Image: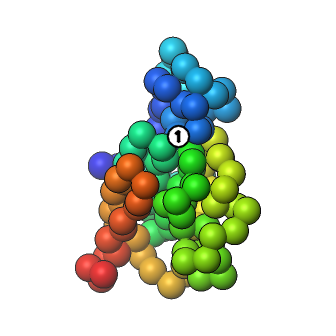
Amino acid sequence: LMADEVWGWGWSGFGQSGTPSSGEVDNPTPIFFEKRIVSLAGSWFHSAACDSSGDLYTWGNGRQGQLGRGGENGGGNSTSVENEEESRPQLVTGITGMHDFASVGCGGSHTMAVTNKGT
């Protein structure tokens, strides 16, 4: 996948479709990224993407830590950030520059990513 455009629609009660509306989003709506998206995943509660620079983005419901933005190192200790719902993709900053992400997947309440190093 190398996407110049990403679009979201459907149920977005937690912002997981990447649209500013909550609830039903009947029409495809663009989700803006600064760089090309190389991997995109979504689940019932949240979504995630990797861009061409290897950065990882998450959005939607983070109540179980699946957004990876709680705690000092991007995971672990839950903070108020994880308890919020975010409808716009946000950079997972605790690991930026440490890894070159190539692929991401979302489960119901978890996220997993693969780097170009295979870790």
The picture places residue 61, in percent across and down from the top left corner, at: 57, 48
Q: Secondary structure at mark 1?
A: loop
Name the image quarter holding residue 112.
bottom left
Q: Residue at x 47, y 48 (%)?
A: 47
The picture places residue 20, in percent across and down from the top left corner, at: 67, 32
The picture places residue 8, in percent across and down from the top left corner, at: 49, 31
The picture places residue 63, in percent across and down from the top left corner, at: 58, 55
Eyeballing the image, is 14 above or below 22?
A: below
Q: Residue at x 66, y 56 (%)?
A: 83
Eyeballing the image, is 43 above or below 77?
A: above
* Coloration mode: rainbow
Which residue in the rendered view is the most extreme toward the right? 80
Camera-side residue: 98 or 53? 98
Query: Quadrant where the C terminus lies?
Result: bottom left
Question: Is residue 19 shown left or right of residue 46?
Answer: right
Residue 51 appears in the picture as rendered: no
Name the image quarter holding residue 68.
bottom right
Q: How many marks?
A: 1
Residue type at mark 1 is Gln
Which residue in the rendered view is the most extreme toward the left? 118
Which residue in the rendered view is the most extreme toward the top? 26
Q: Residue at x 34, y 75 (%)?
A: 115
Question: Is residue 97 shown left or right of residue 79?
Answer: left
Query: How packed is label 1: few (under 14 Cα within 10 Å), some, or many (20 or more)?
Result: many
Residue 61 appears in the picture as rendered: yes
Camera-side residue: 78 or 116? 78
Eyeballing the image, is 104 above or below 13?
A: below
Q: Which residue is mark 1?
A: 16
Q: Residue at x 51, y 15 (%)?
A: 26
